[in-house]
Amino acid sequence: MGRQVRTPLRARDGSIDTSSMPTTRLRLQPHHPLLAEQPSATKEIIPPVESAFYVMGGEEKKDPNGHGTTPVDEKVLRADHDRAAATEGITTSHNDSSTDSSSDAIGLHIVPSKTHSRISRDGDKLSFHDPEKGVISAAVLPSPSQSTRALTLREDENFYPEGGLQAWLVVFGSLCSLLAALGVMNTLGSFQAYISRNQLREYSEGEIGWIFSMYACLAFGFGVIVGPVFDKHGARWLMLVGSAGVVTSLMLLSVCETYWHFMLVFGILGGASTSLIFAPAIASIGHWFKARRGFATGIGATGGALGGIVYPLMLQYLIPQLGWAWATRCLGFLSIFLLSIGCVLVRGRLPPEHNSSAKPDLGIFRDGVFALTVAAVYLLEWALFVPLTYISSYALHAGFTEAFSYQCLIILNIGSVFGRWLPGFYADKIGAFNTMILTTILSVVMVLGVWLPAGMTMPGLIIFCLFFGFASGSNIGLTSVCIGKLCRTENLGRYFATCYTIVSIGCLTGIPIAGEIVKANHGEYWGLMTFTGVCYAGGLAAFIVVRIIKVGWDVKAVY
């Protein structure tokens, strides 16, 4: 019979590693992710086997060395020694010395064979079949409750398609979804400028600001719930419910007349519904890309900037032609079309983690680097919504026409289109944190160096809107990429959404604070500009500290 090898194998954490097996004597699919050798195994070396590998049901795949492998679907184990010229036989047996009936280990005795042999599963046993000798021996398998997860092949989280039709369709679906959802968010300035002079003209800037800050807060704040639900159940139902809510909000917005109407319909319903779309649309892209994640996420996030161009233009053209009611309904009809595409195309790559918890996990803030990154994003978002909301009102205050006040927001979003994907492209080359630091520096310069001293002139205001839009575009486009460097891919939804839940507090307070600053300065905006610039400077400092912690003072380090 020849000498035997006694190698108990154990499934561990859903993966198997056979790197320590004696591959010079017996090649047992050492690359397969579902095989792990038990450390206490005893081995007896056998004569070389030229071609021996395990095949466990399903469709056969090839590894880089040419060995055949297949997923462990049917729990059928075959040993193929067709090319072994000087071999004698194969047997298997249960390793009684290292396992018991409830163990998670499977012991195998393997000896080379000239013939094609088969090991099949019958209940909780593996039976070895030889064409000449019949059933030789059997191995007791772990109970299904112990081995189901280990024997279910999950797509390797370390493998990313980095392209292909399905991956780019997800990016396109994300772009369409964010065009509708974040397009409304990037039109806050147009909404604020109109209703502050019409339906809510008796309210102050600060009071009206609470409506839009509530919208922004809930759009990000529900993430602590949405992220874990996405990781556990996937994107489909979140997208469907969120899309229905966004469309309903826009349709009802057409008939709003009082303060509490706008707060309930737009601030609460619209904001909460946007949250159900935002996190899945961004996090799904991270399932398909890693090396090109910055570029792909930037393209998807470009949808929000495009929406910030399309929606204000529609309002500017349709309000004089059709009135407020039908103008907002037209936004709703466009959103139905765009969100339908998103609901069909946006999907994750990894199977849903049904055994994971859908409860919020604030314990991840024990990671100091993650907490500091969240603080940086908090300060950036605290500042970002101030220009987005008040740029049109500022233009009117500066003496420009109402038409130009709408165009300022459009110019800002044109810059943001390039600021979503171009920094993402370079982030894949020089690092996401490095790119975020550079764009944040540009934001500080634009606010304190251009808007504050030269915002009362048309050239100065146009330059500010264009370049600030470009610099701030990376806020959303690169944030998920930075967070993705701090967690595993299957946890990206939870980390990203938890981050923006904290950020939502800044979104809730930033706009009203800015409004009160304007009121305290008797309608002047210089205090608002200073507040915005200081917040961006604080975010810049936090990002620099994170980079120093991770890679030190090496300015050439890619991070």
Image: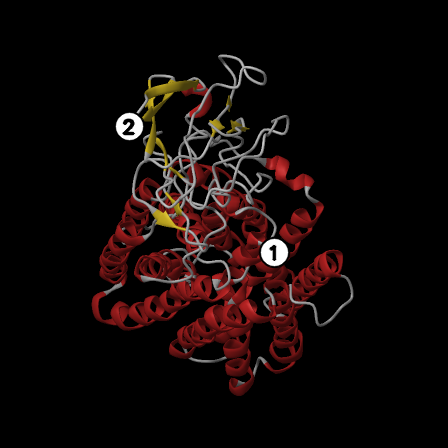
Which residue lies most toward the top here?
101
Question: Which numbered mark, 2 or 1, is in the foreground of this view?
Answer: 2
Q: Residue at x 55, y 78 (%)?
A: 464
Q: Is residue 89 above or below residue 487?
A: above
449 displayed left or right of 131: right
Q: Mark 1 packing: few (<14 Cα in 10 Å), some, or many (20+)?
A: many
Task: Please tell me whether mark 1 sits on a helix, a strand or a loop.
Answer: helix
Per the model, the C-alpha gap separating discs 2 and 1 is 66 Å
Task: Please tell me whether mark 2 sits on a helix, a strand or a loop.
Answer: loop
Q: Pick the quarter of the image with the C terminus.
A: bottom right
The residue nearer to you, when weighing 502 against 66, is 66
Let me know if residue 521 appears in the view: no
Tag 1 residue = 377
Image x and y of residue 181, in percent: 37, 55
What is the three-letter code of the residue carrying label 2?
A: Pro
The residue nearer to you, when weighing 194 against 556, is 556
Q: Residue at x 24, y 53 (%)?
A: 340
Image x and y of residue 136, in percent: 37, 20
Which residue lies most toward the bottom here?
459
Q: Is residue 277 above or below residue 2?
A: below
What is the three-letter code of the residue carrying label 1?
A: Val
Q: Mark 2 packing: few (<14 Cα in 10 Å), some, or many (20+)?
A: few
Tag 2 residue = 131
Q: Residue at x 63, y 60 (%)?
A: 517
Q: How many marks?
A: 2
Q: Is residue 514 above or below residue 124?
A: below
Numbered circle sitting on residue 200: none
Q: Earlier in the sequence, mark 2 or mark 1?
A: 2
Image x and y of residue 507, in percent: 55, 52
> Are the residues tagged 2 and 1 within 8 Å (C-beta)?
no
